[in-house]
Amino acid sequence: GSTPIRDIRVPRGISSYRLELDGYTTVERVLVATEVTLDTIYLPQAGEVPTDMVFVPTGYAVLPGTVGAALRDSSGTIPPIEAFLIDRYEVTNQQYKEFVDAGGYENSSYWESRFELDGSVLPWSEAVKQFVDQSGRFGPPAWLVGDYPSGDDDLPVQGISWFEARAYARFVDKDLPTYFHWHRAAEAQEANYVVPTSSFGGDGPRAAGEAGGMTSFGAIGMAGNVREWTLNPSGNAHFILGAAWDDPTYLFSQHYAESPWDRSNKNGLRLVRYSSEVDLAGLARP
């Protein structure tokens, strides 16, 4: 059809919309209609956005508390976040195994150059020995002999430290989101609409494609399921956001940090691709 679209009736509350146009990427958006609004939705050209990612347009990130004070301008506002791509789903066991099988743990080019543990700086060759499975092979702690349990292909990978998450990101030519990009994509201010359909409760996370809680821009499972590492440090820790399946639901819209060495089974990851203009030096600061 043609835009703008006028004189149509839409239900109040939260609704999911699918926008299609020949030659352009199909976009799914969740919109909250509480009053009359006029929204402009950008459709990327066909092939511009990988099928496993969603497009997040330039806009402001709504942040909890005083995080980001160093980036605020004289009015107290953080500058808008430039458009970027974020994974539609959390990284799965099957995807992470490609990194393990390709020798990702044995290739120093994917890893950080500095590892500090208990006040000591470790060389990469020693640091990587921390990241083994139940059999002593490289991999997540719940895996055995370098593999995950049968049938768990589509579950989000769990037990990943920040160092492993960053190494995997480099392996697939992506990156961890900054704290600000994560909040821009999650739009946690809409928690009242996202959380009820998200993966909270139960005995563990759901398959990545079944985690529910689609955000405004089409990302699935940013609330609950597993926590997601970000680039930003907080003291000696790093922010890990979104909450896990057994966390209190309010953690979706709060900030939380863990040691970069932490390998809790609540820890997972979701990756981004930034525009070439992004100021990572500023946005990834503490």
Image (cartoon, grey):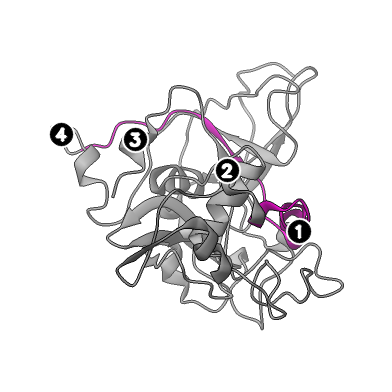
Type of amino acid at the residue the image marks with label 2: Ser
Q: CA distance from mark 3 to mark 4?
A: 22 Å
Q: Is residue 14 visible?
A: no
Q: CA distance from mark 4 to mark 1?
A: 46 Å
Residue under pointer 2:
109
The image quarter in which residue 10 lies: top right
Q: Nearer the viewer, mark 3 or mark 4?
A: 3
Check whether the beta carbons of the residues at disc 3 and disc 1 lie within 8 A of each other: no
Which mark is on residue 281?
3
Picture residue at 68% right of the left edge, 66% below the top: 138
- Crowdedness near tag 3: few (<14), some (14–19) or many (≥20) residues, C-alpha within 10 Å: few
Sequence-earlier tag: 2 or 1: 1
- Crowdedness near tag 2: few (<14), some (14–19) or many (≥20) residues, C-alpha within 10 Å: few
Stretch of the chain drawn in magenta: 77-105
Which mark is on residue 75?
4
The quadrant of the rendering that contains the N terminus is: top right
Q: Is residue 187 visible?
A: yes
Q: Nearer the viewer, residue 148 or 31?
A: 148
Q: Is residue 119 left or right of residue 199?
A: left
The relative height of residue 132 versus residue 63 in the rendered view (above or below) is: below
Type of amino acid at the residue the image marks with label 1: Lys
Q: CA distance from mark 4 to mark 2?
A: 41 Å
